[in-house]
Amino acid sequence: MMKTKNTIYIVAAIFLALGSALHAQVVGKASSGPFLLKNAEIHTITKGTITGDLLVADGKIAAVGTNLSTPAGAQTIDCTGKKLYPGMIDGGTFLGTAEVNSISLTIDNNEIGNLVPHMEALTAVNPNAVAIPVTRVSGVTTVITSPTSGLFPGKSALINLFGYNPEQMYAGFKAEVLIFPSNARRGRFFRQSEEEQKKAYEKSLKDLNDIWEAASTYYKLDSIAMAGGKKFHEDYQPEMKALSEVVAGKMPLLVEVNRKEDIQAALKWLKERPNVKAILSGVAEGFKIADEIAKSKYPAIVGPILALPGREHDAYDVSYTNASVLHKAGVKIALRTGETENVRNLPFHAGFAAAYGLGTDEAFKAVSINPAEIFGLEKSLGSLEAGKTANLFICNGDPFEPSTTIEQVFINGWKIPMNSRHTLLYDEFLERTPGVK
Amino acid sequence: MNSSYPIQTKIDIKMKNNIIIKISVLMIILLFAYAFVRAQSGDIFIKNATLLTVTNGIVEQGDLLVQGGKIKSIGKGISAPANVKTIDGTGLYVMPGIIDAHSHIGIDVVNEASNPVTAEVYVGDVIDPYAIAVYRALAGGVTISHAMHGSANVIGGQCQTIKHRYGNTDPSSYKMEGAPRTIKFALGENPMRVHGEGQGIVPSTRMGVEQVFRKAFSDALDYKAKWADYKSGKTKLAPEYNLRMETLADIIDGKIIVHCHSYRADEILMLLRVLKDFGITKICFQHVNEGFKVAPELAAYGAMASVFADWWAYKFEVYYSTAYNAAILTKNGVVTSINSDDAELIRHLYHEAAKTKRYGNLTDEEALKLITINPAKQLGIESRVGSLETGKDGDLVIFDHHPLSVYAVPQMTIVDGIVRFDRKNDPKDMRLDIDPEEKLSDTYIMHEDEDRCMQDVTEWLFNTQNK
């Protein structure tokens, strides 16, 4: 017995000694606070920039101020010369539901069918997707992850990029996605003739209206039945149930729409349905009708910024300037990358928007407080204020500059290991041993 | 029908006159064309700018004179001859024109996907001078790109180094005079998918890819030997001329630089062994996402690497990638560049290079080399371009901020001393210059989920599989 125990100890010791090698692909564990971040340049976003301290406790920002006293058990982090920012929020990604894009069995965001609004992206979020640590070490702490394909592909969800199950990651906002019918030609493999395309477009519009009418009817009958304390349908109709919440204005509708004429059609469609809490997403050609969008009062999640113009004859920089044009017209904007594995580039998308007219301050709002407000989470996310969720990062410069190092990220108050597959491979291979023998 | 004679004569005279007029017009056109070709290089003087020479440090408040399309002088207090267009560079940054060692812009087709070996085809035959992507690349400061064949075949077609002389309508005006010949090879998933999965022929594995190379080069050696025998009089009958074999023989003879699409460490090492066996030394690996794993081997062979700044995970062979690839390769002594392979990415290669400051802490100069002198070396044009040096081509980009800042906006791009992009005179609508076949009412929202290297392949498979 004793011998076995010794063996265990020896084996354990060997494992510990080999720890670094054995854990070459392990990101590491997060640690919990409280943390007192001392003497930082705190970019609150909503209440100016101050030099002071920020206390993280119980997953929240417990206090922001000068000369905060250190609570018992708190770990102090000296932030002299450093900057603090709220974690950046990406308003549209496929993060967590897609692992390797070319391998369909690793893609969980595109269920079969035109009408699958009962699908939940959150269900398929893999908390251990390799891209998640890769993303969060860039200061992006929170993203919308969306289903795609068809008309109603399901519900997108806002997730924090730390947690061991989707519920821990869920950040309190969901929206039904509508991929608004488009008359655009899609990419280089698009094979439809103009006539086929027109037919498909018209059918798609008709499908949308038919579905909507059915959902509205379902909602009315369901409401009447509910008022009478009864269940309206014995049949299981999850699609209609899901959409009826959008009809009722309880569940927001994220309208994916990019082409000018399609945006106009979507605005018209929405105008006829004033109950719908709509958020526009994509909005690539919004700059062409910025005033119309502003007039509609719908917020817009714009992006990707690093994208080609949709039309050959458009000026080369329209994707860079789009966010700025919309903002100046009075549209409430947030930004999105539309990415999966490179959501980490959100600060660079924002940086380009900033350089091409939006300015750094507005661009940072568009990846922090603006999306929080659009999602109705302005009380818990998007700025450094006492009482909000402790999603934030420490850096040594402008967070949009590639030369800036994001030094430490906190998500839900957890101090996140600043490792990812990319950093671990760097550590292992920078000076490979053995080299060439 | 006697009366028809005079009429016929009249017609003849008219036709003769017509011919004379036509010849005259042609002569005039030719003269203009000559003048136009002559005007393909220009003079320009930039005063009081920060000059990022790349190879000789930074000249603050420096002047730079381009004459006849070449850099005449660099330094402080240079004066320009009268009538030379002068740009006040106060507060601006000037760097050498950006070079993209892997691109598919400015060409009509990318892949001749019909055989695992198509060394005979040539991208220089399909240049599209109207491609708007070339103008957009200029707007991102890119003056030269390597217009490559795609990656459908193990040995693809020959590529063409092009200068972005946008505004010309003659395809050949894009070709960079004197640039060495290059050819595209491809390893891994793409040729395996196209030929193995698609056609049921070798290669369907990375083992098969190796053997396609070995067979092709062995055939080329055989071909060379037959011609040598004929030329020495050993045989009387000339062998059949074969352009594919000629090209492969030229690769063996070091007349063509190999640019090989690759991702995984094992396949990179495989190609190095094959090349060694056939005595081929000029090799630049493209994409080479796992190059960081075999950086010492690449350095030892003298192989170069042209990589993405951060693209990964779009297919399985790039799943084990790191954005620190360029830094690891650079620090291991591999001549490394950052490329685009993409009409969007090519517009901000300066930003892609800047990412190496975050991913691996490269210096400004190391980062700038990744998009200038290093890709120039990979294309064999480093004596002509890639740095601000006297005697080199007048290919320049002027930025309002340091080009490695996210706030940098290219203001002007100059090719051979001629301004090809000027942000102040950028048309809001490019309609005069577009392809007449484009449908103006349609938006082309691209949904790219693979590298551009596979362009035309799906099209081709679709057509063949339906036959």
Image (cartoon, grey):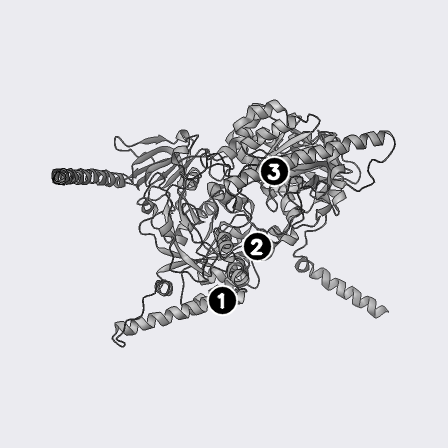
Q: Few, some or many C-alpha atoms within 10 Å of disc 1 (few <14, some 14-19, many ≥20)?
A: some
Q: Residue A355 at x, y = what percent?
A: 51, 32
Instruction: Quickly name the residue at label 1.
Output: B210
Instruction: Single out the residue that lies furthest toward the bottom.
Output: B234
Residue A281 visible: yes
Q: What label does residue A203 carry, if any?
A: 3
How many marks can you see? 3
Secondary element at image label 1 = helix
Dot 3: element: helix
Q: State yes or no: discs 1 and 2 in contact (Cβ < 8 Å).
A: no
Q: Closest to the observer: B156 or A140? A: B156
Q: Chain of mark 2?
A: B
Q: Quadrant of residue B158?
A: bottom left
Task: Give me the chain letter of mark 1.
Answer: B
Q: Earlier in the sequence, mark 1 or mark 2?
A: 1
List x then y, in percent, for residue B459.
49, 52
In the rendering, which numbered label is found on residue B318?
Answer: 2
- Name which residue type carries label 3: Lys
